[in-house]
Amino acid sequence: MNSNILSYLGMQGIDPGIYIIGEVVLLLLVIILLMIIAKQSSDIRTMKTRLKSFMRGHEAESLEDQIVELFEDNQYMKTLSEKNKKDIVDINKRMKKCFQKAGVVKYDALNQMGGKLSCAIALLDEDDNGYIINSVHGNEGCYSYTKIIKNGMSDVELGNEERKALEEAQLV
């Protein structure tokens, strides 16, 4: 094969089969590159579709604003949560001093009257501190008495009904 171009390039003595093989290899490389380009093009189209659906109704600037707003909301919620935790601790401290236990015993103060109109009420906090209120209903009227309870004990002697009310409250 005589060719001026091949002789100019210094490749005049090379077998023409090598040229054909080279052209086939180059053609295969071009086909592979075109396939890669087609795949990349498909991936880019998919990414554009996803981005459009993600950005639907939003511009990049407004999306950034929304992210900043969400961050600020998150900070606010964190602050509010901490305040709520402190408030709960404070409420629990206060609850210890509130009446949490109660015991009520109804009885007939004077055996002559029916209906158990008298009662002893024990009101205690978490540490068994509080009061016993005894309301005695009789023929001449109704009288109420209050006794202070400290650590489950009274400085004044308790009547049977008052003791029962105290025991009932302590069981709660």
Image (cartoon, rainbow, N blue to C red):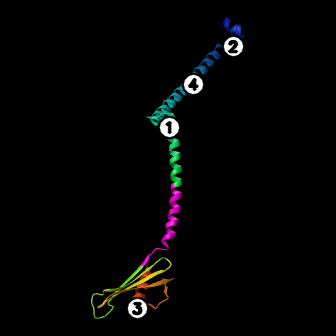
Residues marked 3 and 2 touching at CB (< 8 Å): no
Q: Please give the label number shown on residue 160.
A: 3
| Circles 1, 4 touching at the beta carbon (< 8 Å) | no
Q: Tag 1, which secondary structure?
A: helix
Q: Which residue, given by chain and number where applicable, does mark 1 sit on?
A: 63
Locate residue 36, reporting x and y percent: 55, 27
Residues under labels 2 and 4: Cα distance? 28 Å
**Does label 3 or label 2 sit earlier along the sequence?**
2
The picture places residue 126, in percent across and down from the top left corner, at: 49, 76
Q: In the image, which residues are magenta? A: 80-101
Residue closest to the far front: 140
Residues under labels 3 and 1: Cα distance? 75 Å
Please provide percent x and percent y for residue 67: 52, 42
Q: Nearer the viewer, mark 2 or mark 4?
A: 4
| Callout 2 amino acid | Ile
Helix, strand, or loop for circle 2? loop
Q: Indicate which label's residue lies in the foreground, 3 or 4.
A: 3
Going 30% across and 91% down the picture, which residue do you hit?
Answer: 140
| Label 1, label 2: how far apart the Cα atoms are | 64 Å
- Identify the main secondary structure in magenta: helix
